[in-house]
Image: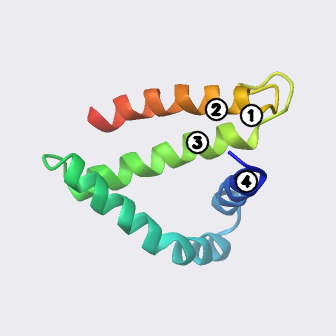
Amino acid sequence: MGKCGIIRAQFVGRSRAEPLPIQVLSDKQFHETQQRFLDILQRAFPNQTRLELEWKLDLVVAVLVRTLNQIGQSGKLITGSSSEEIENAIARLVKFTAGGMKA
């Protein structure tokens, strides 16, 4: 993940922690992308309701954003900032969250 991806993750994470007016603006900005992801997830998991998939996608995004926001901070999940460390962490997160999406 490049610097731009990390900055985007930090922005998304921060927008979720800001007061409601900022959250509303952020939700509008990312609504179309979220709907496309949900359409794909609905095809992958046709037995799950759209509401269930929305809930799970929100949790997946929260986990990824929180983790990516901590890159390079001591005492956190990803203490380094090398591409290899970041890619390994992302692979672990994908494995973990994929299991949650299937549940």
Q: Residue at x 15, y 50 (%)?
A: 46
Q: Are marks 2 and 4 in contact (CB under 8 Å)?
A: no
Amino acid on which disc 2 is placed: Glu
Amino acid on which disc 1 is placed: Ser
Mark 3 and mark 2: Cα distance apart in space: 12 Å
Mark 3 and mark 1: Cα distance apart in space: 16 Å
Q: Which residue is mark 4?
A: 10
Mark 4 and mark 3: Cα distance apart in space: 10 Å
The picture places residue 16, in percent across and down from the top left corner, at: 63, 59
Mark 4 and mark 1: Cα distance apart in space: 17 Å
Identity of the residue furthest to the top in this view:
75
Q: Counting other residues with Cα less than 10 Å from the Cα at mark 4, is it few (<14), some (14-19), or many (20 or more)? A: some
Q: Are marks 4 and 3 in contact (CB under 8 Å)?
A: no
Amino acid on which disc 4 is placed: Gln
Q: Residue at x 65, y 59 (%)?
A: 12
Q: Counting other residues with Cα less than 10 Å from the Cα at mark 2, is it few (<14), some (14-19), or many (20 or more)? A: few
Residue 83 - label: 1
Q: Which residue is mark 3?
A: 64
